[in-house]
Amino acid sequence: MNDALDFGDRTDFDNADRGFVAALTPGVVTAADGRVVWDADAWTALLSGDCPDTANPSLWRQSQLCARQGLYEVTEGVYQVRGLDISNMTIVEGDTGIIVIDPLLSVETAAAALRLYRAHRGDRAVTALIYSHSHADHFGGAAGVTDGSVPIIAPVGFMEHAVAENVYAGTAMTRRATYMYGATLPTGPAAQIGFGLGLASSAGTVSLFPPTIDITHTGQEETVDGVRIVFQLTPGTEAPSEMNFLFPDRRALCMAENATHNMHNVLTLRGALVRDARIWSRYITEAITMFDGQADVLFASHHWPTWGRENWVRFLSEQGDLYAFLHDQTLRLANQGYTGSEIAEMIQLPPALDSAWHARGYYGSVSHNVKAVYQRYLGWFDGNPANLWQHPPVETAKRYVDCFGGVDALLAKARDFVAGGDPRFAAQLLQHAVFADPDHGAAKELLAQVYETLGHGAENGIWRNFYLTGAQELRHGPKTTPIDLGSGMAAVLSIEQLFDTLAIRVDAPKAWHDTIVIDWTFTDLDQSYRTTLRNGVILQQQNPPAGQPDLSLILTKRDLLGMLAGKGLGGATHDGDLGVLPRLVGYLDAPDPGFAIVTP
């Protein structure tokens, strides 16, 4: 797997160490209650030694690079704090203060990063905030660096996509993210060692202030605190709402998360919209054309910078080639009749990309990215009628077990595949054993051992975490998800988005014989809405039409948030049948943040 790689090449290590100013000492960040939300020292201790037998050497090397922690100078007036969260926080010095780019995931780590900067560069005020894109690790720490009173710049569509990804499907995504990031795994050579894009996600408080300045078109220029910024919109790439931007007077180019030192995900395994690898590649090419000759250094919201025009152009060219290759070759083979899972086994990267450290599959992989491209164009169905109406997992598992003559016979066959060096198929068989008989201890333990084998050999960090978290939960059951993105964002949702969050919680079979009409007048927003529960669906209309609702409420957004939190009417006044409110609430399901994944 690693034959193409030059482990003697120290260029990345030199770049990761370049510009070092100081580390956070000790490298531990805690919440107000004393709970540890980030422990950089644990990562430093773990990754300072040689690669153990329980880790892929290539992934170990990448994690060693990600473990560099502290304040770094990128170029004059531009600094980064790295290694204090999954992402980087970049600071650009202006005329009167500083512009913060991507304030990490948690309020606590963002505040610690800002303190580290100020300890070495002076107590400069934050004069603006930039969100490069709509993923939580690039906005969640906002309240750690500002109270929201400064200009906040983001790509158009930022709020819509931040909510859609982190709130609407937030419970399911967060549960799967526990596997993806190994959030409940201990840090150790046989457990969590990082996942390519970073080391881990911090476990602090998530916040969000809405943007005040939208970037609506490529070429848009803004001057903030005396600093000129030229923007390139890149929707549909690594995030649905994303942008690159140049600081022409600093000759520094920020590529957001569109070009990092690993292969990225076309479809992240926690779940998201499928990204467009074709347009991703084209926007990278556009960035080269647009900014060539204007930058001496390229930096991003993860990893370390690339200095020198020739180096960053080559880096971007290879990154663009990577996503174009995955896109084009997947479709070439799909048009020859191969399915996504078949194509994933067939595609090999060109030698120049396969040997490039920054194109390795530490975070995305050729395998699941190919399947994502296939899914984007052709969906979940591979065209084979046998796969059109399969039984769900438990019923399928029972039938497999019956065909093998019972769970014990299936286990014996799985052991043969383990002994024969095929843990992949052993895992498929053992999954059926566990789903058919989830109380069969031997089946669960053998599957856990197989998952450990697969995890310890994986070059891809999130594959490792999925396998090892699966093994952990087979043995000990699910652990509490350490972070809830949705609850930290509720206050900044629009009324429409808040009603959407109710609509996706309706237990339709309970509700579909009832009709409830409520008018909501928000005095603080000068907005009025009508919600109608009908056929198990909550529909909403702004500016209610004529007609008599069952209930009319005059309230503020704060009152609505209180109602949703179970705190009663607050300061709301009403006309009509107040009893329809508890009736409506009674139809709402509560999401399950700890639902089973490796067991039925």
Image (cartoon, rainbow, N blue to C red):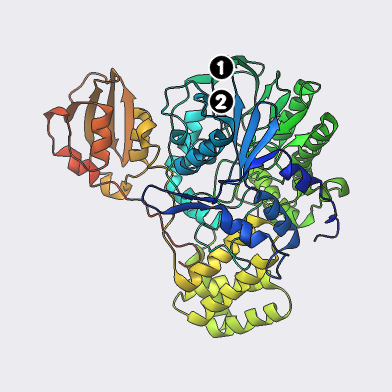
Q: How many labels does the image show?
A: 2
Quarter placement of the C terminus: bottom left
Q: In this view, does 381 lie to the left or right of 29?
A: right
Who is closer to the viewer here, 209 or 367?
A: 209
What's the amino acid at mark 2? Ile
Residue 155 shows in this picture: no
- Rendered residue at 56%/70% (across/down): 431
Who is closer to the viewer here, 293 or 380?
A: 293
Q: Distance between the residues labelled 2 and 1?
A: 8 Å
Tag 1 residue? 225
What's the amino acid at mark 1? Asp
- Rendered residue at 34%/28% (across/down): 495
| x and y, in percent, of residue 28 in the image | 51, 52
Circles 2 and 1: CB atoms closer than 8 Å: yes
Whether 338 is drawn above or below 573: the answer is below
Tag 2 residue? 99
Who is closer to the viewer here, 358 or 49?
A: 49
Quarter placement of the N terminus: bottom right
Is disc 2 surrounded by few (<14), some (14 to 19) or many (20+) residues within 10 Å?
many
Residue 497's quadrant in the figure? top left
Is disc 1 surrounded by few (<14), some (14 to 19) or many (20+) residues within 10 Å?
some
The mark nearer the N terminus, 2 or 1, is: 2
Q: What element carries label 2?
A: strand
- Rendered residue at 67%/16% (across/down): 219
Q: What element carries label 1?
A: loop
Whether 43 is drawn above or below 414: the answer is above
Q: In this view, does 69 lie to the left or right of 140?
A: right
